[in-house]
Image (tube, rainbow, N blue to C red):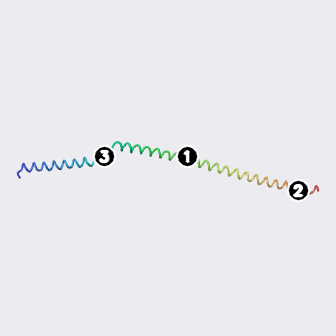
Amino acid sequence: MNRTEFIVATAVVLFVAFCVGWFSNWLIHRFIRVSKSDVGELEKMAQELHEAEETRDQAITYMQQREAELTNQLSQTEAELKATMDGLREARHEAEQLRAQLDRMRARAE
């Protein structure tokens, strides 16, 4: 094998190595590449997720406000019930005193 044949053989081997490298690079990028439709779908899913999170946050805020309102209303109702019960207790006591006084007056009248 003379010098020219060696150079040609080396050039052919390097060219084949280049072609194999280029083909493998193309093949890898072909399988890894994300298509535009996939990117669009991912963006759509991200937007829907963002909207769902906003809706969830709004629902949580609404529930907290509603809970505060109901707690306040319950406190007011309990205060009104306590006041009513106190008033009823006083009215019963007064009615009992009036009955006792009426019974005493009837006893004197007889």
The kind of residue tagged 2 is Asp
* Residue beneath the point at 50% across and 45% down: 55
Q: Position of residue 3 (x, y in %)?
A: 6, 50
Mark 1 → mark 2, Cα distance in angstroms: 60 Å
Q: Is residue 49 left or right of residue 110?
A: left
Q: Position of residue 31 (x, y in %)?
A: 29, 48
Q: Tell me the SS state at disc 2.
A: helix
Which quadrant is home to the C terminus? bottom right
Pointer 1 or 3: first along the chain:
3
Pointer 3 or 2: first along the chain:
3
Q: Nearer the viewer, residue 82 or 38?
A: 38
Mark 3 → mark 2, Cα distance in angstroms: 102 Å
Residue corresponding to mark 1: 62
Q: How many badges with numbers are in the image?
A: 3
Q: Tell me the SS state at disc 1.
A: helix
* Residue beneath the point at 47% across and 46% down: 52
